Image (spheres, helix red, strand yellow):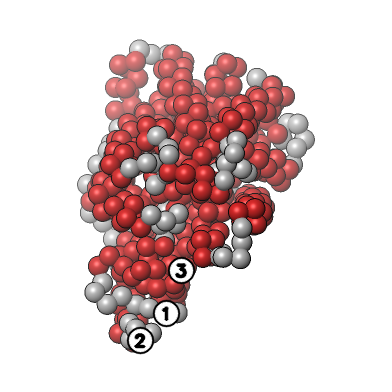
Amino acid sequence: MTPQSLLLSVLAYFGLLYAVAWRTSRGARNADFFVGNRTSAWPLVAFGMIGTALSGVTFISVPGSVGNDGFTYLQVVIGQTIGYGIVAFVLLPLYYRLGQVSIYAWLARRLGDWGWQTAAVFFIISRTLGATARLYLVIRILQDISFDSLGVPFAASTFAIIGMIMLYTWRGGVKTIVWTDTLQTAGMLFGLAACIVFVLQALPMATHDAFARIDDMGLMRVWGTEPTARDFWLKQVVAGIAIGLAMTGMDQEQMQKNISVRTLKDSQINMMVTGFAMMAVVTAFLVLGALMTLFAQVNGLEARGDRLFPAVVMGYLPAGLQLVFVIALISALFPSADGALTALTSSCCNDVLRFEQRTDLDESARTRLRKRVHLGFAALFVALTVVFRWIDDPSMIGLILKIAAYTYGPLFGLFACGLLSRRPAQGPLIAVAALTAPVLCIVLDAMQPRIFTTYRIGLEMLLVNAAVTYALLWIAARVRPASV
C-alpha cells in the first residue's frame, strides 16, 4: 500500500470524526463540554472507555511484549478489573453526591484547597505525560510507514495530527467524545479481529498446530511464580488494583465520562462492563502477539517489541489489511488523546482557574477562556510528543506505567488520606508531602540493587509512592494543627 493512499485514509477517517463532532456539538455549552450535561448513555460510555483505557500503546506494545513476557500482563488486567469494582462502589457514590464537574473538588472538603489543587496539578502532570507518550508511539509508526516517504518531518506530522484532534474536540468536549470514542473503539476492535484472522491464515500450519507451537514456546504463560521477580502474580495483581483505582477512579479524564452518565447505578454498571470487556480485549491482543511472535520466527523476522506488529503487517500482509491496520491504529490513538485533551482543559478550568467560583465571568467569557486553555494544552502536546522522539523507549507501555507510578502515587495517597484519616493534613505542607514522595521513590528505585538482594520493586512502586505520600501527610497533620 502506497504512503499516499495511507495519508488519504487518515484524512478520510478524520473527516468522518469531524462530521460526528459537528453533529454532536451543535448548541454545546460549557456544561456539555465538561460532563456532557450528564445525559450520556452508559452503553456508549462503556464501549468508548475500552478504547480510551487501551490506547495505541496497548494496540502496539501489548502484542510486542508477548515474546519476552508471555501472557503475564493479564495479571495486571485482572487486578485492574478488581480495582474497577472498588471505583464503582466506593468512589463513584462520593462523586455523584458531590455533584460537581471535577472529582478533585471532593478533596477540598477533607484536605482544603491545598489538597484539591495539589491533586489537580498531579493529574495534569500525569495525564499530559501519559497522553503524549501514547501519541508519540502511534505518530512514530505512521511516520515510519507513510510520512517519512512523503518527506513530512516528524514535528509537522505531530502538529497536524494534534491539530485534527483539537478541531473535533474544540466545541463539544465530553458530549462529542462519548460518540467519537464509540466509533473509534469499534474501528480498533475490528482491526484487532481482522489481524488475528489474517495472521492465522498467513501461518503455514493449521490453527491448532499454531497454538500448540505457541504453547511449546512458553508464550502462553500467565502466572509469574517466582516471588522475587517483577512479574510475580501477587505483585502484578495488587499493582493492577492500584492502577485501576488511581488511573481510572482518581483520573479526571476517565471519571468525567462516568459522571456524564445520568444516574449512579448506570455509571456503576458502566464501570463493571468496561472492566470485564477490557479483560476480553487484552486477552485478544495477547493472542495476536503470540501469533505474530510465531509468524516472525517462521519467517526469520528480527523485529521485536513495539516494532513487531507494524513490521509483520506492513511487510508481509495484503494491502487491504494494511489499510485496516492503519485505521485501527488511528482508532486506538484518538480516544486516548481526545479524552486527555478535554479532561486537561476541564481540570485546568475547574480546579486551577475555578470556573464555578468566578462570578466575574459570564458564559461567553468562560467559553473564550476555556478555548484558550484547550489550545494551550494542544501546543504542549505537540512539544512533549517531539521530546519523546528523542527518548524512543523500546517498550512504551513500560515507560508509561513507570511514569504513572511516580505521578499517580501522590494522587492515590491524597485520596487515601481524604478517605481514611480522622485528622487529615491541611495547608501548604500537603503540596510539600506530595512532591517529596516521588523524589524519595526515585531514590529508592535507583538504590534497589544495594538495598535488596534478589527482590525488585516493579509496578507496585505506585503503591509504595502512595504509602510514602500518606505517611508524609500523616506527619504533616501532626506538625501543623488541622485547623490551620
Q: Could you say which is closer to the camera, residue 77 or residue 346?
A: 346
Dot 3: few (<14), some (14–19), or many (≥20) neighbours within 10 Å?
Answer: many
- Would you name the residue on which mark 1 appears? 427
- Would you name the residue on which mark 2 appears? 480
Mark 2 or mark 1: name the one nearer the start of the chain.
Answer: 1
Q: Could you say which is closer to the camera, residue 383 or residue 440?
A: 383
Mark 2 near mark 1, Cβ–Cβ under 8 Å? Answer: yes
Q: Amino acid at mark 2?
A: Arg
Secondary structure of the residue carrying numbered label 1: loop
Residue at 52% in and 44% down: 32
Q: Residue 204: image x %, image y %?
A: 42, 14
Dot 2: few (<14), some (14–19), or many (≥20) neighbours within 10 Å?
Answer: few
Residue at 25% in and 67% down: 420
Secondary structure of the residue carrying numbered label 2: loop
Q: Residue 273 appears in which quarter of the rendering?
A: top left
Above or below, 351 against 222 in this view is: below
Separation of marks 2 and 1 at Cα, in angstroms:
9 Å
Q: Could you say which is closer to the camera, residue 336 or residue 421?
A: 421
- Would you name the residue on which mark 3 appears? 118
Q: Amino acid at mark 1?
A: Gly
**Position of residue 459 in the picture relative to residue 393 (left or right):** left
Q: Amino acid at mark 3?
A: Thr
Quadrant location of the N terminus in the rendered image: top right
Above or below, 433 against 96 in this view is: below
Q: Residue 460: image x %, image y %?
A: 32, 57
Separation of marks 3 and 2 at Cα, in angstroms:
18 Å
